[in-house]
Image (cartoon, grey):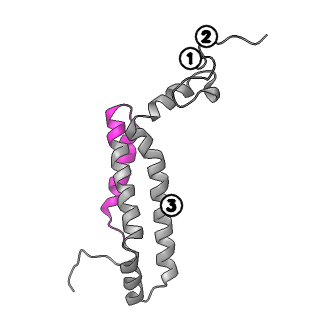
Amino acid sequence: MTCSSEGTALTPPLFLPVVLLAGAVAARRPGRPGRVGAGITSVVALLFLAGSTANLPNDFAAADAAGTPRALTAGLAGIHIALSVAVLHNGLPTVRGRRAVEVAAAGSPNAAACGSNGRRSGYGDCGRNMPRSR
């Protein structure tokens, strides 16, 4: 029996989930470590997305050769696509530095009225020095 580093259509590279978890742990930290972690998770999400779509014909051929249902392969590709989009949706704003503004705005008393730039239209300072209701 020989060992092979190649997987089947249903076996993703095992190091990617480990890298994804490490990036997610780092992404929770503030500042540069968090941005680097979010960048790592975004790269892994792009790899999952590319592997789920660009490699799908090869995955179907491997599934046919292994005798596994194509629907299972397509379902796993769909899960990878959904996971990739969700990770990118959450990771890219952090990489770009936008998440810090949203978190700062969420700490103000009128966070729901704040825009993405931390300002409330008409008052200019999002919860600070706003006229009180009578």
Q: Nearer the viewer, residue 89 or 4?
A: 89
Give the labeled residue for mark 1.
Answer: 125
> In the figure, is residue 87 to the left or right of 1?
right
Image point (51%, 28%), residue name = 117
Q: Does dot 1 land on a helix, a strand or a loop?
A: loop
Residue stretch rendered in magenta on the structure? 12-36
**Which residue carries the number 2 mark?**
129
Tag nearer the camera, 3 or 1:
1
Task: Tell me what residue is drawn at x 35 percent, y 56 percent.
Answer: 44
Residue 61 in which image quadrant: bottom left
Q: Amino acid at mark 3?
A: Ala
Q: Local crowd at mark 1 within 10 Å, few (<14), some, or many (≥20)?
A: some
* Disc 2 and disc 1 in contact, CB within 8 angstroms: yes
The answer to if 13 sits in the magenta stretch is yes
Prevalent SS, magenta region: helix
Q: CA distance from mark 2 to mark 1?
A: 7 Å
Residue at disc 3, secondary structure: helix
Query: Can you give x and y, in whole percent of width and height, for residue 66 in the image?
Result: 39, 87
Callout 2: SS? loop
Is tag 2's residue or tag 3's residue first in the polypeptide sequence?
3
- Tell me which numbered mark, 3 or 1, is placed earlier along the sequence: 3
Check disc 3 and report the residue beneath it. Answer: 82
Task: Determine the residue located farthest toward the front in the rendered image.
Answer: 122
The amino acid type, in three-letter code, at marker 2 is Asn
Q: Is residue 22 visible?
A: no
Q: Are marks 3 and 1 in contact (CB under 8 Å)?
A: no
Q: Nearer the viewer, residue 122 or 9?
A: 122
